[in-house]
Image (cartoon, rainbow, N blue to C red):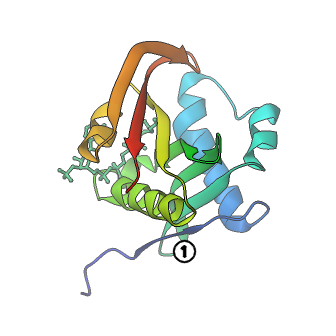
Amino acid sequence: MADEPDIAVIEALIGSDLYRQSLRLREAVLRRPLGLTVTEEELADDAMRQHFCAISYGLVVGTVSLRPLDEATLQLKQMAVAEDRRREGIGARMLAHAEGWAHGAGFLLMVLNARMGAEGFYARFGYQAHGEPFDENTIPHIGMTKRLS
Ligand SMILES: CC(C)(COP(=O)(O)OP(=O)(O)OC[C@H]1O[C@@H](n2cnc3c(N)ncnc32)[C@H](O)[C@@H]1OP(=O)(O)O)[C@@H](O)C(=O)NCCC(=O)NCCS
């Protein structure tokens, strides 16, 4: 339909322009508001992760990464949607894409540390909170998991 937003979720290979745009979005959404930056340690860890981005009319408007913890478990990290593009279903599209990729690759469990406030987003898609809240990057988070089927 002509007025449907043009959104696709695709891989952002390290070193690509899509990866660089994704990194800028991560920094803008997840780090700068907390007075932090993406650390060298985190950049090094990126090599161990699978990166996806949502693009709209050629621009990255969302980003998410997956890091294997063991043969069966992936940790979903760095989920961020551009502030002016939230509540359009972009986060949901990226989550579904990440889960589809994970399932296809044979992983059985997705785990993540949700910022308090984003917990409701993940709960809508079947993630269950566990344990006590803890601080990460200076703000409270809660552990959440979902069995992939
Ligand atoms: C959390 C975030 C990724 C959600 O992305 P989004 O594109 O706005 O979400 P969607 O539009 O796909 O929302 C899907 C559903 O979740 C709901 N939802 C979105 N954000 C929510 C929130 N914070 N709490 C509860 N529900 C939420 C939407 O209303 C929608 O529900 P519906 O299908 O019944 O209409 C986005 O708000 C964001 O980037 N926030 C800042 C960074 C952040 O907190 N990242 C998570 C780190 S753990």
In this picture, residue 59 sits left or right of residue 44 = left
Q: How many marks?
A: 1
User: Could you tell me which quadrant the N terminus lies in?
Assistant: bottom left
Asked whether, in this view, residue 27 is left or right of residue 97, the answer is right
The amino acid type found where label 1 is placed reads: Gly
Q: Residue at x 30, y 59 (%)?
A: 89
Q: Residue at x 37, y 55 (%)?
A: 85
* Figure check: 55 above or below 139: below
Q: Which secondary structure lies at badge 1?
A: loop
149 over 32 or under it: above or below: below
Quadrant placement of the C terminus: bottom left
Give coordinates of residue 5: x percent, y percent.
Answer: 33, 74
Give the x, y percent position of residue 143.
44, 26
* Residue displayed at 71% across by 57% down: 20
Residue 14, image x, y percentages: 76, 60
Q: Above or below — where is 139 with respect to 4?
A: above
- Residue 107 visible in image: yes
Image point 37% across, 22% down: which residue? 130
Find residue 105 and report its image quarter: bottom right
Residue 117 showing in the rendered view: no
For the residue pair 143 and 147, the one nearer the viewer reads as 147
